[in-house]
Image (cartoon, grey):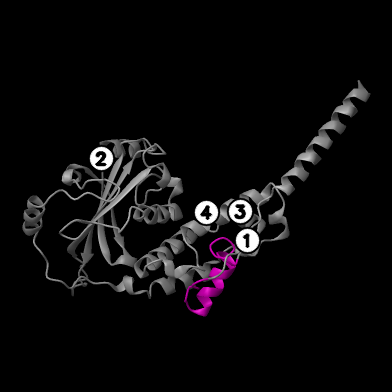
Amino acid sequence: MKKSGLTFYRGAAIMVIVIFVGLQMISPNIENPPVTSEIAVPAEVKQILERACYDCHSNEAKVEWFDKIAPASFLVAHDIDEARSRFNFSEWDKNPTAVQELLLWEMVNAIEQEKMPLKRYKLAHSGGKVTASELAVLKQYVNTLPGRHKVDTARIVSRTSVNQKASTQKTPVSLNNIPYSSDYKNWKIISVTDKFDGGSMRIVYGNDIMVKAIEKRQLPFPDGARIVKVVWGKQAEDMDGNVLPGNFQNAQFMIKDSKKYSATEGWGFAKFDGLDLKPAGKTVLFEQTCANCHRLLAPENDFVFNIPTK
């Protein structure tokens, strides 16, 4: 018995060694592509980003020796690929200016909510943690971005004019075949937000399936759930400190269909801009931009912002 038991453990140990060596042979090679457009921010901001974010969100990742050992190397390679697909500080100019501001704001929000850097990254890289004082530096910077101070100075178009125009035009359809519908006006309001980086005021509506899922704390949300976020500009603060909504800017749709929209986390995205409700995007790839933004901050909420799920 003792001899057979010893033989078993030796065999098991040899098997583990063989598997370990085999994993090293197929371990992914983590490479740094060329830097094409470095983000331009103040030096104190850049220093924080380089230390806490660049190992995943740039083409200048500093991979430690232990990051290269399988099976950990597979997870590290996956995290870097995923992070670069969401936003890459070394290819920053690929994003329009408005998207750059949005990403910076959502990044700061993610750090404040301790969703970034990833907990597993901080466990192995103690220097990646962002301190309270560093977070304050980042907040101070994003508060200087132009979008933070946007004010709607255009003549306010009455609701009657908007409704009349909407009723006479052909139903707009997004490039990924999501039609605009005003049915959301009969849905329940699930959130009201003030988006500082875009100078806008927003109301979020949910259909019955979405509302029931929120009430039951059901995550991920079921197929058939729908959300519409309606966005208005913000007028300048008056003498009494009141800030009133400006003109209608857009309506943003999210439709849950885990099979149809599997490439965008199970959600179909659409945005209709201005009084003409012009579908956003030049190609159907616009939905990837939407999905990447939602992947950045909200995976724990099934990639949905501004809902009372906690």
Residue 281 colored in magenta in the image: no
Q: Note whether 224 is above or below 152 in the view shown.
A: above
Q: Reading the chain from its start, which is encountered first: label 3 or label 1?
A: 1
Residue under label 2: 207
Figure check: 7 above or below 273:
above
C-alpha distance separating marks 1 and 2: 45 Å
Q: Residues within 10 Å of mark 4 (few under 14, many from 20)?
A: some
Q: Is residue 41 magenta?
A: yes
Q: Give the label, 1 or 2, closer to the camera.
A: 1
Q: Is residue 139 left or right of residue 239?
A: right
Dot 3 alpha-carbon crowd within 10 angstroms: few under 14, some 14 to 19, many 20 or more = many
**SS assignment at label 4:** helix
Mark number displayed over residue 82? 4
- Residue 208 appears in the figure: yes
Residue at image point 47% right, 76% down: 40
The amino acid beneath tag 4 is Glu
The residue beneath circle 1 is: 31
Up the image or down, 194 lies above or below 27; here it is: below
Hey, what amino acid is under mark 2? Asn
Kind of residue at disc 1: Glu
| 3D distance between C-alphas at marks 2 and 3 | 39 Å
Residues rendered magenta in the picture = 36-60
Q: Earlier in the sequence, mark 1 or mark 4?
A: 1
Whether residues under marks 3 and 1 lie with C-beta atoms below 8 angstroms apart, the answer is: no
Q: Judge from the rendering whether residue 241 lies leftward or rightward of residue 73; answer left or right.
A: left
